[in-house]
Image (cartoon, rainbow, N blue to C red):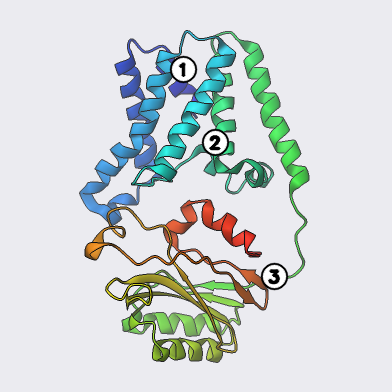
């Protein structure tokens, strides 16, 4: 999908035109892929699309400036430039926009996905841009570049296929509840219906329970629900007064086993820029501890919403023994 952008940027009449081509390409990508942003941010979503489109624009600007380079150097450098920009916008920049890295296109392509355990999502993005650069060069008559790209893709799939681990026998049944209004009783009603199906885990959404404090009474009430439903309960909760910082709320997930034992909590680590980083004079409280939870089905890690857009928690929790 990057071939047209690379090809057009190299042939643009000026660096400025190449920049505008990249900006247009980025806006189209964001508007179609992040179509849900207006539901969260309203009209301000347009400015977020523009900020995200800035990075393909800078990439296209660079492609034009390097259009006269030798093919091999140009293709390898283009992949490095893209990943450098991607890493900056996702990990270093204050906005932490981790959406839409090319490597995430393989989220359900198991053979290629295996390589993420070695090179990470940024490594997968490097492969994507490298292959696209080679195909773009093939359009200009460098046919060997296209053959190299095909060989690279075949090698990724073939070697990744051999890396797929065998599936363990047995299923884990998970009931996911999507309803954020705890006070209405609807969440409780949906959970009762789900519990009738005897799930191993019953997972509430982020902030399903709004509580004043993570006190004994709150924990005991949720513990009884897990015990009554005979399931592991992962309860998303907003605590108005956090044990970490008494004057700031905490966005967390409380974990209980089927006997009602409270296994602990995960506190959201990656906060959404503007909305969660700065509200109420400092944003949500963040706890530095990384926890995993021993369940009947193995050691579990928990992540909340924006946490899942980053690689650090997955790697740290796996290092602590998390199996899923």
Residue denoted by label 1: 7
Pinpoint residue 59: horizontal percent, then vertical percent.
Answer: 41, 26
Quadrant of the rendered structure where residue 317 is? bottom right
Q: Which residue is drawn at 54% across and 39% down?
A: 122
234 is higher (above) or lower (below) than 259 = above
Mark closer to the observer (3, 2) = 2
Quadrant of the rendered structure where residue 55 is? top left
- Whether residue 8 is visible, yes or no, is no
Callout 1: SS:
helix
Pinpoint residue 124: horizontal percent, then vertical percent.
Answer: 58, 38
Q: Which residue is drawn at 42% across and 71% down?
A: 252
Local crowd size for mark 3, using a 10 Å CA cut-off: few (<14), some (14–19), many (≥20): few
Q: Earlier in the sequence, mark 1 or mark 2?
A: 1
- Find out whether the residues at labels 3 and 2 contact each other: C-beta distance under 8 Å: no
Residue denoted by label 2: 125
Quadrant of the rendered structure where residue 275 is? bottom left
Residue denoted by label 3: 171
């Amino acid at each position: 999908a990057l071939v047209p952008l690379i090809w057009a940027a190299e042939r643009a009449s000026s660096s400025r035109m190449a920049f505008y081509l990249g900006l247009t390409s980025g806006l189209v990508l964001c508007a179609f892929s992040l179509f849900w942003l207006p539901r969260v941010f309203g009209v301000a979503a347009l400015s977020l699309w523009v900020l995200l489109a800035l990075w393909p624009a800078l990439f296209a600007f660079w492609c034009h400036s390097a259009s006269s380079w030798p093919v091999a150097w140009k293709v390898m450098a283009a992949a490095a430039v893209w990943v450098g920009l991607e890493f900056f916008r996702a990990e270093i920049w204050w906005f932490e926009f981790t959406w839409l890295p090319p490597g995430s296109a393989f989220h359900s392509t198991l053979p290629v996905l295996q390589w993420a355990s070695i090179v990470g999502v940024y490594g997968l993005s490097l492969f994507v841009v490298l292959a696209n650069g080679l195909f773009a060069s093939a359009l200009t008559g460098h046919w060997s570049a296209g053959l190299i790209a095909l060989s690279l893709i075949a090698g990724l799939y073939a070697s990744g296929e051999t890396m797929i681990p065998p599936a363990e026998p047995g299923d884990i049944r998970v009931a996911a509840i999507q309803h954020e209004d705890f006070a209405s009783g609807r969440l409780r009603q949906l959970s009762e219906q789900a519990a009738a199906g005897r799930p191993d885990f019953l997972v509430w959404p982020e902030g399903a329970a709004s509580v004043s404090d993570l006190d004994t009474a709150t924990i005991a009430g949720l513990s009884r629900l897990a015990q009554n439903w005979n399931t592991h309960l992962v309860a998303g909760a907003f605590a108005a007064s956090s044990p970490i910082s008494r004057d700031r709320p905490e966005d967390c997930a409380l974990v209980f086993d089927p006997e009602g034992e409270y296994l602990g909590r995960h506190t959201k680590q990656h906060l959404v820029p503007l909305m969660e980083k700065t509200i109420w004079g400092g944003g949500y409280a963040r706890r530095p501890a990384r926890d995993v939870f021993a369940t009947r089905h193995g050691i579990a890690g928990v992540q909340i919403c924006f946490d899942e857009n980053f690689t650090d928690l997955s790697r740290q929790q796996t290092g602590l023994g998390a199996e899923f």
